[in-house]
Each structure stands twice: as C-alpha cells, then as structure tokens.
Amino acid sequence: MTDALFDGWEAAWSGRDPGAFAPLVVPDVHYEDPVTPEPLVGIEPLVGHAQRLWKAFPDARLQSTGERLFGGSFVAAPCKVLATHTEELEGLAPTNKFIIVHAVVYAEVRDGRVFRARTFFDLYDAAVQLGVLPKPGTLGERALLLLRGFGITRR
C-alpha cells in the first residue's frame, strides 16, 4: 500500500493535475521543503506550491532513486527532480538550464494517506545548477563569502 501511495505521490508532482493530490493526502496535510518559508497546511497550499514548480519548470518530473524505507507509520522515499527552468520563478528570470536535484521525502502516513511530509534537498546545489550561486571552491564562492562577512583565510 505504501509503495502505491508514493508511486502516486511521484505521479502527482510529475503530472500537473492539481486534483491528483487529494486522494493521496489528508485534508490538513502538513508539507515543507527548503523553499517553503514555513510548513504548508492543507491541500490548497500544497497544490499551489506544486503549481509554482510546474509554472517555472514545465517539464518537471519526480522519479524514485532507490528503495523506500518503511518503519511503522513513517516512510523515507529517495527521489530526484528533473526539470528545465524555462519560466520566471519568484523574480528569477528563466535560465533555460536543466537541473537534477536529489531529494528524500520523509513522511508520516495515517490511514493510507500522507499526513506530514518534509522533502529534504540541497538548495545551494540547485542554485548552483541554475547559475544563481557559484560552485563550491571557486573564486566566486570565496568572493560571496567575503561579501557575507566570513572573510578569506590563507590555506
């Protein structure tokens, strides 16, 4: 049952059908990831979040990357998002860059539906792939750290 639930979860994020989430989550689902400023509560905010993804990355799709781990009512589901940034994203002009972002969805399941889900992924790596932030170890990263007040030390 839980594999089917998370197959559906991946299909909902990939399918661009706002109605696909309703049978998968409880009405007051709690969801968060590195780009949500606070947890989203309810189906409508979750769908709105998915729609922002779909708008900025029209080809976005979620794919499983490994075995899902089950423990009682909790599930850890490794996956990746594959997408091309072709539309504006909260003030960021389209970069037309293809990105692959690995993630883990950690969820609590109640009565066969997602009650709480938190998706973990490396936001810095996603920004580097989009060309928004410099690659680690580069002069650009050192300059950014200097601007942030971390200074530059001799190695």
Image (cartoon, rainbow, N blue to C red):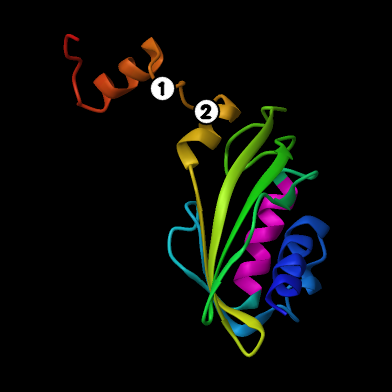
- Asked if the magenta segment contains residue 1, the reply would be no
Which residue is rendered at x = 20% and y = 15% of the image? 152
Q: Which residue is mark 2?
A: 128
Q: Mark 1 falls on what kind of element?
A: loop
Q: Which quadrant of the figure has residue 110?
A: bottom right
Amino acid type for the residue under numbered disc 1 = Pro
Labels 2 and 1: the sequence-earlier one: 2
Lateral position of residue 52 relative to residue 32, left or right:
right
Labels 2 and 1 touching (C-beta < 8 A):
yes
Q: Amino acid at mark 2?
A: Val
Residue 136 badge:
1
Q: Alpha-carbon neighbours of circle 1 within 10 Å: few (<14), some, or many (≥20)?
A: few
| Position above or below: 35 against 92 | below
Relative vertical location of residue 26 with respect to residue 12 in this rendering, above or below: below
The picture quadrant where one finds residue 113 is: bottom right
Q: Report whether 109 appears left or right of 38.
A: right
| Residue 149, picture quadrant | top left
Q: At which x and y percent is residue 20?
A: 79, 72
Judge from the rendering whether residue 40 lies leftward or rightward of residue 66; answer left or right.
left
Residue 19, horizontal then vertical, whole percent: 80, 74
Question: Which part of the image, by quadrant, shows the N terminus?
Answer: bottom right
> Which residues, given as a range, are shown in magenta?
44-55
Mark 2 residue element: helix
Q: Position of residue 25 (x, y in %)?
A: 66, 79
Inter-mark Cα distance, 2 to 1:
9 Å
Q: Nearer the viewer, residue 128 or 106?
A: 106
